[in-house]
Image (spheres, rainbow, N blue to C red):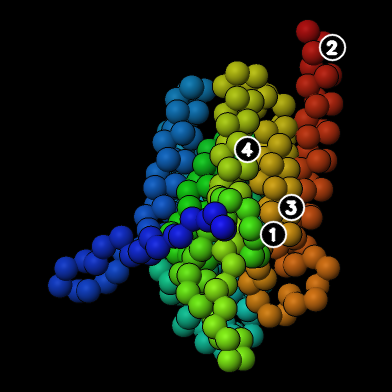
Amino acid sequence: MLSYITWTADPTAFTIPFIGREVRWYGIAFAVGFALGAWIVSKIWKHEKLDEGWYDKLFLYVIISATVGARLGHCLFYNPGYYLNHPIEIFKIWEGGLASHGGTLGILIAVWIYSKKITHRNMLWTLDRLVVPVGFVAALIRLGNLMNHEIYGHATHLPWAFRFIDNIGFVQYGQTPVFTLPSHPTQLYEAFFYILTGFVCLWMYWKREDYKYPGLIFGVFLIGIFLSRFFVEFFKNIQETFEEGMLLNMGQLLSIPFIIAGIWLVYKGLLSKKDKEKTC
């Protein structure tokens, strides 16, 4: 007998009275993630006694750039034809559809502007501090995907498989109704690796003080997030029809540059650390 989890969670957390607007768990997870990230970065700011004005501006830059970048990334990387023909749909962020690659690019652009206008320091100085909590933020967003019954994986017989809304019932093959197989809960796979990456970044910052070596924490973050994303994609269903038959899907192709950048940054950061240890 198959063992699996039937996932029937309601994607809607509650409905706002009088206006009838649904508030989804996905949106709540997104908001909680940003709040948690802001709190951890505020602790970093206090630990190093940094300018509070810098922190206030950083939070504003990041929340706008991450949201806009993630939404545009989803629209332009995965379904550009539809969204270019229906541009008003781009603004319906509450319906879901965010791409981590787009969010990352948005944040990188924002940090470049922030570094030029606010701190007048190297981008890596900001990024080594900013990414410390991002693994936890990304994990919460994946839990939001779980609540939305979306971005799950291929059919599997594994005992921790999930039966989501789309594959709970029967499907018709010819004259015979067939019970669909449960799927890989790839949202949970990614969330696990993202949380692990978050703890590694916390350890590197607080215990090893690796923020003293430019790019080291940021490089580890890029490898942890995007290498895990690359491998989990092998278990996922494709998100768009154009990915049919591709050796690597869009998520994997977009992850490769970030993985390479992460490896290079870790290499440079370790060289910096080695050189500093020699002079001590």
In the rendered image, the vertical position of residue 209 relative to residue 182, given as above or below: above
Q: Amino acid at mark 1?
A: Phe
From this viewpoint, is residue 153 visible? no
Q: Could you tell me which residue is drawn at 48 percent across and 49 percent down?
A: 140
Sequence-wise, which precedes: disc 3 or disc 4? 4
Report the front residue among 14 and 37. Answer: 14
Question: Decide: marks 4, 1 in contact (CB < 8 A)?
Answer: no
| Disc 1 to disc 3: CB gap under 8 Å | no
Residue corresponding to mark 1: 235
Q: CA distance from mark 2 to mark 4?
A: 29 Å
Q: Secondary structure at mark 4?
A: helix
Whichever of labels 2 and 1 marks the residue nearer the N terminus, that label is 1
The local crowd at label 2, few if under 14, some if 14 to 19, many if 20 or more residues have their Cα within 10 Å, is few
Q: Nearer the viewer, mark 1 or mark 3?
A: 1
Amino acid type shown at disc 4: Thr
Q: Earlier in the sequence, mark 4 or mark 1?
A: 4
Residue at 24 percent of width and 67 percent of height: 15
Mark 2 vs 3, N-terminal side: 3
Q: Which residue is mark 4?
A: 197
Q: Are marks 2 and 1 in contact (CB under 8 Å)?
A: no
Element at label 3: helix
Front residue of 229/7: it is 7
Say if 7 sits above or below 126 in the image: below
Which quadrant is home to the N terminus?
A: bottom right
- The vertical placement of 249 against 142, above or below, is below
Q: Secondary structure at mark 2?
A: helix
Q: Amino acid at mark 3?
A: Phe
**Disc 3 designates what residue?**
231
